[in-house]
Protein backbone atom coordinates (compact mmCIF):
# COMPACT_ATOMS: atom_id res chain seq x y z
CA UNK A 1 0.00 0.00 0.00
CA UNK A 2 1.33 3.41 -0.92
CA UNK A 3 2.25 5.81 1.84
CA UNK A 4 0.03 8.42 0.19
CA UNK A 5 -3.07 6.30 0.83
CA UNK A 6 -2.20 5.83 4.50
CA UNK A 7 -2.04 9.60 5.00
CA UNK A 8 -5.67 10.21 4.14
CA UNK A 9 -7.37 11.30 0.97
CA UNK A 10 -5.16 13.75 -0.94
CA UNK A 11 -6.66 16.96 -2.32
CA UNK A 12 -7.69 17.42 -5.94
CA UNK A 13 -4.72 17.89 -8.23
CA UNK A 14 -2.40 15.56 -6.33
CA UNK A 15 -2.52 13.13 -9.26
CA UNK A 16 -0.27 15.53 -11.17
CA UNK A 17 2.69 14.76 -8.90
CA UNK A 18 1.74 11.36 -7.46
CA UNK A 19 3.54 9.23 -10.11
CA UNK A 20 6.84 11.08 -9.65
CA UNK A 21 6.62 10.96 -5.86
CA UNK A 22 5.88 7.23 -6.01
CA UNK A 23 8.89 6.58 -8.21
CA UNK A 24 11.12 8.59 -5.88
CA UNK A 25 9.74 6.68 -2.90
CA UNK A 26 10.53 3.36 -4.58
CA UNK A 27 13.97 4.62 -5.56
CA UNK A 28 14.71 5.62 -1.97
CA UNK A 29 13.52 2.25 -0.68
CA UNK A 30 15.78 0.43 -3.12
CA UNK A 31 18.80 2.56 -2.21
CA UNK A 32 18.28 2.01 1.51
CA UNK A 33 18.06 -1.75 0.95
CA UNK A 34 21.29 -1.81 -1.08
CA UNK A 35 24.43 -3.27 0.38
CA UNK A 36 27.14 -0.95 1.71
CA UNK A 37 30.13 -3.00 0.65
CA UNK A 38 32.89 -0.94 -0.92
CA UNK A 39 31.41 2.36 0.24
CA UNK A 40 32.66 4.84 2.77
CA UNK A 41 30.86 5.02 6.10
CA UNK A 42 28.92 8.16 5.21
CA UNK A 43 28.52 7.39 1.51
CA UNK A 44 25.60 5.08 2.19
CA UNK A 45 23.63 8.14 3.39
CA UNK A 46 24.10 10.07 0.16
CA UNK A 47 20.97 8.72 -1.62
CA UNK A 48 18.80 9.67 1.38
CA UNK A 49 19.93 13.30 1.34
CA UNK A 50 19.90 13.50 -2.44
CA UNK A 51 16.48 11.95 -3.07
CA UNK A 52 15.00 14.06 -0.28
CA UNK A 53 16.43 17.15 -1.98
CA UNK A 54 15.08 16.11 -5.37
CA UNK A 55 11.62 15.30 -4.05
CA UNK A 56 11.39 18.59 -2.17
CA UNK A 57 12.70 20.57 -5.15
CA UNK A 58 10.19 18.88 -7.43
CA UNK A 59 7.17 19.84 -5.30
CA UNK A 60 8.61 23.31 -4.66
CA UNK A 61 9.06 24.02 -8.37
CA UNK A 62 5.71 22.54 -9.36
CA UNK A 63 3.95 24.96 -7.01
CA UNK A 64 6.00 28.15 -7.01
CA UNK A 65 7.65 28.09 -10.42
CA UNK A 66 5.22 26.35 -12.75
CA UNK A 67 1.91 26.73 -10.84
CA UNK A 68 0.99 23.15 -11.70
CA UNK A 69 -0.31 22.26 -8.23
CA UNK A 70 -2.51 24.22 -5.87
CA UNK A 71 -1.68 25.51 -2.42
CA UNK A 72 -3.80 22.71 -0.94
CA UNK A 73 -1.65 20.06 -2.65
CA UNK A 74 1.54 21.81 -1.54
CA UNK A 75 0.30 22.07 2.06
CA UNK A 76 -0.69 18.39 1.96
CA UNK A 77 2.86 17.45 0.99
CA UNK A 78 4.34 19.62 3.75
CA UNK A 79 1.99 18.50 6.52
CA UNK A 80 2.42 14.82 5.64
CA UNK A 81 6.22 15.20 5.44
CA UNK A 82 6.44 14.17 1.83
CA UNK A 83 8.93 17.04 1.46
CA UNK A 84 11.50 18.65 3.75
CA UNK A 85 9.75 21.81 4.96
CA UNK A 86 12.89 23.09 6.70
CA UNK A 87 14.94 22.80 3.52
CA UNK A 88 12.24 24.51 1.45
CA UNK A 89 12.13 27.38 3.95
CA UNK A 90 15.87 27.91 3.43
CA UNK A 91 15.51 27.98 -0.35
CA UNK A 92 13.41 31.13 -0.05
CA UNK A 93 16.22 33.07 1.61
CA UNK A 94 18.95 34.88 -0.36
CA UNK A 95 22.05 32.76 -0.78
CA UNK A 96 20.34 29.44 -0.03
CA UNK A 97 18.53 28.85 -3.34
CA UNK A 98 20.58 25.71 -4.09
CA UNK A 99 21.09 24.40 -0.56
CA UNK A 100 21.51 20.63 -0.60
CA UNK A 101 20.58 19.92 3.02
CA UNK A 102 20.09 21.73 6.30
CA UNK A 103 22.81 19.48 7.72
CA UNK A 104 25.58 21.31 5.85
CA UNK A 105 24.76 24.71 7.39
CA UNK A 106 24.54 23.49 10.98
CA UNK A 107 27.77 24.70 12.59
CA UNK A 108 27.52 21.98 15.26
CA UNK A 109 28.21 19.35 12.60
CA UNK A 110 31.63 20.75 11.61
CA UNK A 111 34.85 21.70 13.31
CA UNK A 112 35.61 25.23 14.44
CA UNK A 113 31.96 26.30 14.11
CA UNK A 114 32.05 26.43 10.30
CA UNK A 115 29.85 24.95 7.58
CA UNK A 116 30.46 22.45 4.80
CA UNK A 117 32.86 23.21 1.95
CA UNK A 118 29.98 22.78 -0.50
CA UNK A 119 28.65 26.12 0.77
CA UNK A 120 31.77 28.02 -0.34
CA UNK A 121 31.22 29.98 -3.59
CA UNK A 122 33.10 28.75 -6.62
CA UNK A 123 35.04 31.98 -7.09
CA UNK A 124 36.39 31.75 -3.53
CA UNK A 125 37.96 28.33 -4.06
CA UNK A 126 41.27 27.46 -5.60
CA UNK A 127 41.46 26.09 -9.11
CA UNK A 128 42.37 22.58 -7.92
CA UNK A 129 40.06 22.45 -4.91
CA UNK A 130 37.91 19.32 -4.77
CA UNK A 131 34.45 20.01 -3.39
CA UNK A 132 32.46 17.08 -2.01
CA UNK A 133 30.58 17.08 1.24
CA UNK A 134 31.24 13.75 3.00
CA UNK A 135 27.69 13.44 4.35
CA UNK A 136 25.50 14.51 1.43
CA UNK A 137 27.85 14.06 -1.54
CA UNK A 138 27.14 17.64 -2.65
CA UNK A 139 29.60 19.09 -5.18
CA UNK A 140 28.72 22.70 -4.42
CA UNK A 141 25.38 24.30 -3.59
CA UNK A 142 26.44 27.93 -3.09
CA UNK A 143 24.43 30.55 -4.94
CA UNK A 144 25.86 32.97 -7.45
CA UNK A 145 27.50 32.77 -10.88
CA UNK A 146 29.72 29.82 -11.71
CA UNK A 147 27.88 27.50 -9.36
CA UNK A 148 27.35 23.81 -9.88
CA UNK A 149 24.40 23.18 -12.20
CA UNK A 150 23.82 19.65 -10.93
CA UNK A 151 24.84 19.81 -7.28
CA UNK A 152 25.17 16.04 -6.92
CA UNK A 153 26.58 15.20 -10.35
CA UNK A 154 24.06 12.40 -10.89
CA UNK A 155 20.38 11.93 -11.72
CA UNK A 156 19.31 12.99 -8.23
CA UNK A 157 20.53 16.51 -8.93
CA UNK A 158 18.23 16.94 -11.92
CA UNK A 159 15.21 19.25 -11.84
CA UNK A 160 12.29 16.90 -12.34
CA UNK A 161 9.64 19.62 -12.48
CA UNK A 162 11.36 21.30 -15.43
CA UNK A 163 11.65 17.95 -17.19
CA UNK A 164 8.01 17.06 -16.62
CA UNK A 165 6.70 20.44 -17.76
CA UNK A 166 8.89 20.34 -20.89
CA UNK A 167 7.54 16.90 -21.78
CA UNK A 168 3.96 18.03 -21.23
CA UNK A 169 4.56 21.01 -23.51
CA UNK A 170 6.05 18.70 -26.12
CA UNK A 171 3.03 16.41 -25.93
CA UNK A 172 0.73 19.41 -26.35
CA UNK A 173 2.76 20.56 -29.36
CA UNK A 174 2.51 17.12 -30.95
CA UNK A 175 -1.24 16.95 -30.38
CA UNK A 176 -1.68 20.41 -31.89
CA UNK A 177 0.39 19.37 -34.89
CA UNK A 178 -1.67 16.22 -35.41
CA UNK A 179 -4.89 18.22 -35.13
CA UNK A 180 -3.65 20.75 -37.69
CA UNK A 181 -2.63 17.99 -40.11
CA UNK A 182 -5.99 16.26 -39.72
CA UNK A 183 -7.84 19.53 -40.32
CA UNK A 184 -5.74 20.23 -43.42
CA UNK A 185 -6.40 16.73 -44.76
CA UNK A 186 -10.14 17.07 -44.15
CA UNK A 187 -10.19 20.45 -45.86
CA UNK A 188 -8.29 19.03 -48.82
CA UNK A 189 -10.73 16.11 -49.13
CA UNK A 190 -13.73 18.43 -49.01
CA UNK A 191 -12.41 20.78 -51.71
CA UNK A 192 -12.99 20.74 -55.44
CA UNK A 193 -9.48 19.55 -56.29
CA UNK A 194 -8.73 16.77 -58.78
CA UNK A 195 -8.70 13.21 -57.36
CA UNK A 196 -5.06 12.63 -58.26
CA UNK A 197 -4.02 15.95 -56.80
CA UNK A 198 -6.01 15.27 -53.65
CA UNK A 199 -4.43 11.82 -53.36
CA UNK A 200 -0.97 13.29 -53.74
CA UNK A 201 -1.74 15.87 -51.08
CA UNK A 202 -2.95 13.16 -48.72
CA UNK A 203 0.16 11.13 -49.40
CA UNK A 204 2.38 14.11 -48.67
CA UNK A 205 0.54 14.95 -45.49
CA UNK A 206 0.62 11.35 -44.31
CA UNK A 207 4.26 11.01 -45.20
CA UNK A 208 5.16 14.19 -43.37
CA UNK A 209 3.16 13.19 -40.33
CA UNK A 210 4.59 9.67 -40.28
CA UNK A 211 8.13 10.96 -40.70
CA UNK A 212 7.69 13.45 -37.87
CA UNK A 213 6.27 10.77 -35.57
CA UNK A 214 9.08 8.34 -36.34
CA UNK A 215 11.72 11.03 -35.86
CA UNK A 216 10.36 12.25 -32.56
CA UNK A 217 9.29 8.91 -31.11
CA UNK A 218 7.30 8.33 -27.91
CA UNK A 219 7.96 10.23 -24.71
CA UNK A 220 10.20 8.39 -22.20
CA UNK A 221 8.71 6.65 -19.18
CA UNK A 222 11.53 7.61 -16.81
CA UNK A 223 11.08 10.69 -14.62
CA UNK A 224 14.79 11.47 -15.02
CA UNK A 225 16.48 13.07 -18.01
CA UNK A 226 17.13 10.88 -21.03
CA UNK A 227 19.05 13.36 -23.19
CA UNK A 228 21.44 16.27 -22.81
CA UNK A 229 18.73 18.89 -23.30
CA UNK A 230 16.79 17.61 -20.31
CA UNK A 231 19.96 17.29 -18.24
CA UNK A 232 20.70 20.98 -18.77
CA UNK A 233 17.30 22.09 -17.51
CA UNK A 234 17.47 24.17 -14.38
CA UNK A 235 15.04 26.26 -12.34
CA UNK A 236 16.91 27.28 -9.19
CA UNK A 237 17.79 30.75 -10.47
CA UNK A 238 14.25 31.35 -11.70
CA UNK A 239 12.59 30.65 -8.35
CA UNK A 240 15.15 32.47 -6.21
CA UNK A 241 12.86 35.49 -6.11
CA UNK A 242 10.58 33.74 -3.61
CA UNK A 243 12.71 35.06 -0.78
CA UNK A 244 15.12 37.41 -2.52
CA UNK A 245 17.96 37.13 -5.01
CA UNK A 246 21.51 36.01 -4.54
CA UNK A 247 23.19 39.13 -5.86
CA UNK A 248 22.57 42.83 -6.28
CA UNK A 249 22.03 42.46 -10.01
CA UNK A 250 19.39 39.82 -9.43
CA UNK A 251 17.72 42.04 -6.86
CA UNK A 252 17.60 44.98 -9.26
CA UNK A 253 16.19 42.88 -12.09
CA UNK A 254 13.62 41.34 -9.77
CA UNK A 255 12.51 44.72 -8.45
CA UNK A 256 12.29 46.20 -11.95
CA UNK A 257 10.18 43.31 -13.22
CA UNK A 258 7.86 43.49 -10.21
CA UNK A 259 7.40 47.23 -10.67
CA UNK A 260 6.63 46.85 -14.35
CA UNK A 261 4.24 43.89 -14.05
CA UNK A 262 2.87 44.39 -10.55
CA UNK A 263 3.41 40.71 -9.84
CA UNK A 264 6.72 40.67 -8.00
CA UNK A 265 7.99 38.13 -5.48
CA UNK A 266 6.97 40.17 -2.46
CA UNK A 267 3.31 39.84 -3.45
CA UNK A 268 3.62 36.05 -3.54
CA UNK A 269 5.67 35.39 -0.43
CA UNK A 270 4.91 31.82 0.72
CA UNK A 271 3.90 30.91 4.26
CA UNK A 272 6.31 28.00 4.73
Image (cartoon, grey):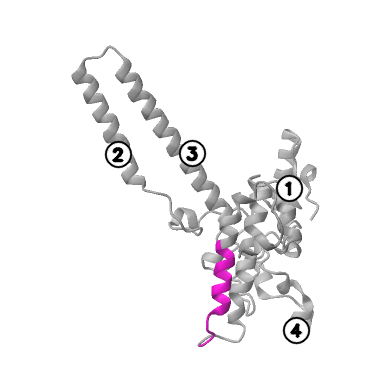
Sequence-earlier tag: 4 or 2? 4
Badges 4 and 1: C-beta atoms under 8 Å apart?
A: no
**Nearer-the-camera pick, 190 or 63:** 190
Which residue is labeled 3 in the image?
Answer: 172
Q: Give the magenta part as a residue range.
A: 23-37
Residue 164 rendering spot, x and y as whole percentages: 54, 51
Q: Quick check: 216 above or below 38?
A: above
Q: Nearer the viewer, residue 54 or 236?
A: 54
Residue that numbered label 1 is attached to: 71
Q: Secondary structure at mark 2?
A: helix
Q: Position of residue 140 (x, y in %)?
A: 62, 69
Determine which quarter of the picture holds residue 87: bottom right
Cα–Cα span, label 4 and label 2: 63 Å
Residue 18 horizontal/vertical position (percent): 60, 55
| Contact between labelled residues 1 and 3, with CB atoms less than 8 Å apart | no
- Residue that carries the numbered disc 4 in the rendered image: 111
Quick one: SS at disc 4?
helix
**CA separation, marks 3 and 2?**
17 Å
Q: Residues within 10 Å of mark 2 (few under 14, many from 20)?
A: few
The answer to whether residue 123 is left or right of residue 34 is: right
Question: Is 18 rendered above or below residue 151?
Answer: above
Disc marking residue 210? 2
Identify whether 233 is placed above or below 52: above
The circle on residue 131 is none
Q: CA distance from mark 1 to mark 2?
A: 42 Å
Of marks 4 and 1, the one in the foreground: 1
Please tell me whether residue 31 belongs to the stretch shown in magenta. yes
Amino acid sequence: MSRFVRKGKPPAGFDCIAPTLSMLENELRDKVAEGHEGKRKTESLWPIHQITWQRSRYVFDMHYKYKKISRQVYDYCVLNKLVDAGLIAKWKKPGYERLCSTYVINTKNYKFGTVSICRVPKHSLGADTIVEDPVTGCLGCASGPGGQRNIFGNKYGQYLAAIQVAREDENARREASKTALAAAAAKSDGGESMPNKGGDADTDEDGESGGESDAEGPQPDSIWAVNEKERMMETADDVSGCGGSSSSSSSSSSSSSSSSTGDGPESKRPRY
